[in-house]
Amino acid sequence: MEDKFAIQLFEGNKVRVVWDEEQEKYFFSVVDIIQVLTDSVNPTDFLKKMKSRDKELAEGWGQFVIPLAYRTAGGKQKINFADLQGIFRIIQSVPSKKAEPVKQWLAQLGQQRIDQMIDPEQTFQMAVEDYRCQGYSDITSSTQKQKTKRVNYLLMTKTNNRLMTDR
């Protein structure tokens, strides 16, 4: 596992992040996320109490949290990290008003995804919107038109395959 370590800032707080090239995804320090969402003076203790209150979280902990050796001022230490899916699961259990906007955002994303599954055209519209946000707002060149056709084709194929398997 080839890792790249970094520190990101979130609302002025440091969050340790690891990029795993093999899995091609980010892992975030669990205790740093708890610190950001709770302002706890002892996020490690807060996390222990949270796990004792949420038995399902405690039982599934090893499935989405992995200890990684991370270089600190005191040398390498094992720190619990989780990928985005694991962080989302942990956030669901955080009893903090600061976590509520994140929980509402996650609920909104979930609702959008369900709506897209019900009405596949929404998936296409979202892809077009995302495409425009990437700087392709004025599709004029033939290369951009070809990319758009390819994206449309892939989305339609994916949607059709999903509809066929859902039946």
Image (cartoon, rainbow, N blue to C red):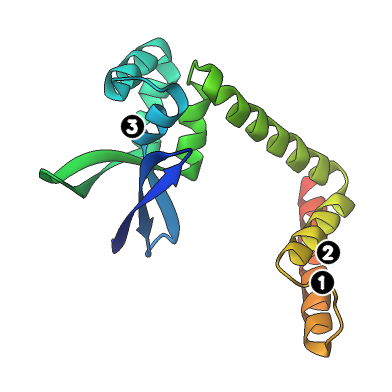
* Horizontal relation, residue 52 to residue 24: left or right: left
Disc 3 crowd, CA 10 A, few/some/many (<14, 14-19, 20+): many
Pointer 3 or 2: first along the chain: 3
For badge 3, the amino acid type reads Val
Q: Are marks 3 and 1 in contact (CB under 8 Å)?
A: no
Between marks 2 and 1, how big is the CA–CA gap? Answer: 5 Å
Task: Say which quarter of the image contains residue 28.
Answer: top left
Q: Which residue is situated farthest in the top direction here?
A: 53
Secondary element under disc 3, as helix, strand or loop, is helix
Of 50 and 64, the residue lying toward us: 50
Q: Which residue is situated farthest in the bottom direction here?
A: 142
For badge 2, the amino acid type reads Met
User: Residue 36's x, y, as percent?
Assistant: 43, 31
Secondary element under disc 1, as helix, strand or loop, is helix
- Taking the image as drawn, is residue 105 in sight? yes
Q: Quadrant of the N terminus?
A: bottom left
Give the residue pinned by disc 2.
156
Task: Say which quarter of the image contains residue 157.
Answer: bottom right
Between marks 3 and 2, how big is the CA–CA gap? Answer: 41 Å
Give the residue pinned by disc 3.
31
